[in-house]
Image (spheres, grey):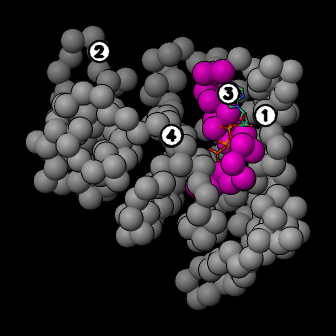
Amino acid sequence: MHLALDRLTVMRGDCPVVDGASLAIAPGELVGLIGPNGAGKTTLMRGALGLLPHTGMSSLTDMAPQTRARHVAWLPQAREIAWPVSVETLVTLGRTPHLAAGQRPSETDRAAVAEALRIMDLSGFEARPATKLSGGEQARVLIARALAQDTPLILADEPIAGLDPGHQIATMQAFAQLAAGGKAIMVSLHDLGLAARHCTRLILMHRGRIHADGPPEKVLTKANLADVFGISAHLTRGPDGVIFQPLEVLT
Ligand SMILES: Nc1ncnc2c1ncn2[C@@H]1O[C@H](COP(=O)(O)OP(=O)(O)OP(=O)(O)O)[C@@H](O)[C@H]1O
């Protein structure tokens, strides 16, 4: 397993905002973490990484910092790029866990950076100052940095928010391909259509708890959509995958 949580609980004041979450994510899985605003998705990932005080167990928190940085890439929701460094420099920062102190990037590091830039459709952007890119381009640069880290596990908080439809689909396809190659990837997202189409598994959170966990068609049921999101939707399986369209807010 690349990630295991056992009864992970994160408190905010007196209130558990993640409440007894247990899960295991294996190589090959692209897991979509879904749920309404405030359901606890970000808190679950930050708790799993040991970035928030918690009770219960996460397989990541026992690791030494260097080992953890080689095991998991974390892509937080905030997209701010503060320094006007070049795109290539910023994506190369993803290689830091693989470098000894003061060591310059090797051919392997440069190849990993070039591959991450290619995957995120950023070839040709290498010399551009990262702060002068559009919001969606900056988001793609930060995904590229996480990909350049080349870890067995990637946790990404709303990585495709703000990307245009083509880049949203391409990014989900890239994640699916990386998972098929043996990585384990967990992404939070609000686009249930893309989640249903590209993820091998969905984890549905509701009020801090895991409400459902399984293949998209088993999680995006009429009852779960009504109980958790208060919506109706149309789900069908076409020849090349699941097609999911939210329809109405239930009153
Ligand atoms: N620093 C904080 N102090 C108190 N409560 C917090 C804090 N951070 C988050 N919360 C609360 O914890 C709950 C879960 O928040 P979280 O950010 O994990 O939700 P989310 O599922 O990622 O939501 P979204 O889809 O809006 O990003 C929310 O009710 C939120 O208000």
Q: Secondary structure at mark 4?
A: loop
Question: Within the image, what quadrant is residue 230 found in?
Answer: bottom right
Residue 239 located left or right of residue 4: left
Q: Which residues are magenta?
A: 30-52
Which residue position holds label 3? Answer: 47
Q: Residue at x 25, y 33 (%)?
A: 90
Type of amino acid at the residue the image marks with label 1:
Val
- Quadrant in the picture for the C terminus: bottom right
Rounded to the nearest whole Å, what is the CA distance between mark 4 and mark 2?
28 Å
Q: Which mark sits nearer the N-terminus, 1 or 3?
A: 1
Rounded to the nearest whole Å, what is the CA distance between mark 2 and mark 1?
36 Å
C-beta proximity under 8 Å, tags 1 and 3: yes
38 in the magenta segment: yes
Q: Residue at x 60, y 49 (%)?
A: 188
Under 8 Å from ligand 1: the CB of mark 4? yes
Q: Is residue 6 above or below residue 140?
A: above
Q: Nearer the viewer, residue 194 or 218?
A: 194
Q: Which mark sits nearer the N-terminus, 3 or 4?
A: 3
Which residue position holds label 1? Answer: 18
C-beta proximity under 8 Å, tags 3 and 2: no
C-beta proximity under 8 Å, tags 4 and 2: no
Type of amino acid at the residue the image marks with label 2:
Ala
Rounded to the nearest whole Å, what is the CA distance between mark 3 and mark 4?
15 Å
Instruction: Give the percent coordinates (x, y) of residue 93.
Output: 29, 29
Instruction: Give the percent coordinates (x, y) of residue 96.
Output: 32, 24
Q: Which mark sits nearer the N-terminus, 4 or 1?
A: 1
Under 8 Å from ligand 1: the CB of mark 1? yes
